[in-house]
Image: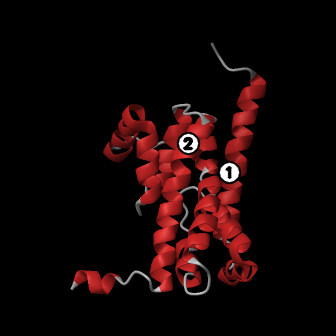
Amino acid sequence: MEPKDGWTLQRVLILVVIAALSVAIAFIPQERLESLQGYGYLGIFLLCLLANATIVLPTPAFLIVLAMGAHLSPLGLGLAAGSGAALGELSGYLAGYSGQAIIPDNPTSRRLTGWMENYGGLTIFLLAALPNPIFDLGGVAAGALKMPIWKFLAWCWPGKVIRMGFVALLGSGLLNLPNWLN
């Protein structure tokens, strides 16, 4: 059974908006992004929301969180940055949910899709918590597999808060990795 024309149009519009947002955010001047720091936790929340709303295109949010770790509470910074990052990841999820996102056919994406099918929420949590370049594919896969949005956010949010909290702790100097390596 084919989807109704209105649903197809809605999917295409979602994909176009997400792609346009990704390109627009990627071209925001670094100075403009850094000016959000002056707004404290709200600025970091917005910066991370925007930075994570891009699909595949890299943005410097973690570097700004690292730098702000010296100026703001690492706990508050981790919560604000992680919350913004988790909400920003909805762009990939929605692209997958709309059915219009293209997941490349390669061993990595097949393995990731298998993990999502077998361990959905845990896969999202680990991808969100650990630094890696494939979270966007995980979000797209979660949407394509029709994981409920609340479940996606329930697993993504704590992972992003842990990740950003760790970055904030590094920036604050409370974690000194070079000493751990000796």
Relative height, residue 63 to residue 24 (above, below)? below
Q: Nearer the viewer, residue 16 or 165?
A: 165
Question: How many C-alpha atoms fall within 10 Å of the one at disc 2: few (<14), some, or many (≥20)?
Answer: many
Q: Quadrant of residue 79?
A: bottom right
Q: Quadrant of residue 179?
A: bottom left
What kind of colouring is applied to the model shown? secondary structure
Percent x, y of residue 153: 58, 46
- The earlier-in-sequence mark between 2 and 1 is 1
Distance of label 2 from label 1 (alpha carbons): 18 Å
Residue at screen point 61% across, 39% down: 150
Q: Nearer the viewer, residue 78 or 145?
A: 78
Helix, strand or loop status at disc 1: helix
Residue carrying label 1:
18
Residue at screen point 66% across, 53% down: 19
Percent x, y of residue 124: 46, 46
The C terminus - image quarter: bottom left
Residue at screen point 72% across, 80% down: 32
Relative height, residue 118 to residue 131 (above, below)? above
Q: Quadrant of residue 149?
A: top right
Position of 177 with respect to 5 (left or right) is left
Give, as a three-letter code, the residue at label 1.
Ile
The residue positioned farthest toward the right in the image shown: 6
Residue 136 circle label: none
Give, as a three-letter code, the residue at label 2.
Phe
Question: How many C-alpha atoms fall within 10 Å of the one at disc 1: few (<14), some, or many (≥20)?
Answer: many
Residue carrying label 2:
152
Helix, strand or loop status at disc 2: helix
The N terminus - image quarter: top right
State which mark lies toward you, 2 or 1. Answer: 2
